[in-house]
Amino acid sequence: MTRSFTGRHMAMIMVAFFGVVIAVNITMATLARQTFGGTVVDNSYVASQQYNGWLAAARAQDALGWAAGISLDAVRHPVLAITPAAGAGFTASGVASHKLGRAPAIDLAFVADDAGRLVARQALPPGRWQVAITLRRAGQSAHLAAELQ
């Protein structure tokens, strides 16, 4: 004898289906909230009003002709290799922020090494770091950013 499909069976299927959907939504929302690193800008409209100023500042920075390669050395110290005059008269400071905000930001101070590069005094812990550096020489400055891993 076969059993017939009843309203009770349909109710159990509906409860199970929506139970799975709700459980997945709650799990995804919890994971998203725990890994959210923050906003890029607090007010995108205000940021859009400053866009032309940012473009002008970027053009002025490009006109300086400074280029800096940002990398990590063997013991995870951020290193700046600057052109044209490697390290000559340049000072640098910066901050390293964890990409997902899971670790506190690290202030970076740089010193020149024998090769004319600027090397941070602080080593970065393992992980992905967003490094923002301000490079200065003779009253001029440039802002650099890189992701280091």
Image (cartoon, grey):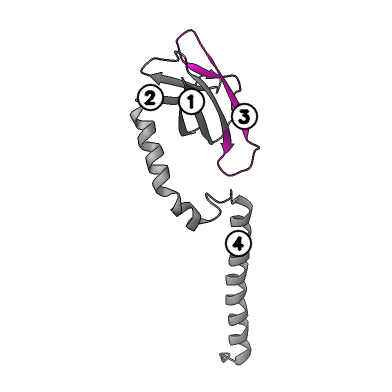
Q: How far is disc 3 from disc 4 in space, using C-alphas?
A: 32 Å
Mark 3 or 2: the one toward you: 2
State which tag comes first along the sequence, 3 or 4: 4
Q: Magenta region: which residues?
A: 96-122
State which tag comes first along the sequence, 4 or 1: 4
Tell me the amino acid under the disc marked 2: Trp
**C-beta proximity under 8 Å, tags 2 and 1:** yes
Label 4 crowding class (10 Å Cα cut-off): few <14, some 14-19, many 20+?
few
Tell me the amino acid under the disc marked 1: Leu
State which tag comes first along the sequence, 3 or 1: 3
Q: Classify the position of the N terminus by image quarter.
A: bottom right
Towards the viewer: 47 or 74:
47
Q: Residue at x 59, y 26 (%)?
A: 108
Q: Which residue is mark 1?
A: 135
Label 3 crowding class (10 Å Cα cut-off): few <14, some 14-19, many 20+?
some
Q: Which residue is mark 4?
A: 29
State which tag comes first along the sequence, 2 or 4: 4
Q: Is residue 131 left or right of residue 34?
A: left
Query: Which residue ends up furthest to the top in the rendered image?
Result: 114
**Occupied quadrant, residue 23:** bottom right
Residue 46 is one of the magenta-drawn residues: no
Mark 3 or 4: the one toward you: 3
Residue 111 is one of the magenta-drawn residues: yes
**C-beta proximity under 8 Å, tags 4 and 1:** no
The percent position of residue 54, horizontal first and vertical second, equals 42, 43
**C-beta proximity under 8 Å, tags 3 and 1:** no
Q: Which residue is mark 3?
A: 107
Q: Secondary structure at mark 2?
A: loop
Q: How far is disc 2 from disc 4 in space, using C-alphas?
A: 44 Å
The percent position of residue 97, horizontal first and vertical second, equals 58, 37
Q: How far is disc 2 from disc 1 in space, using C-alphas?
A: 9 Å
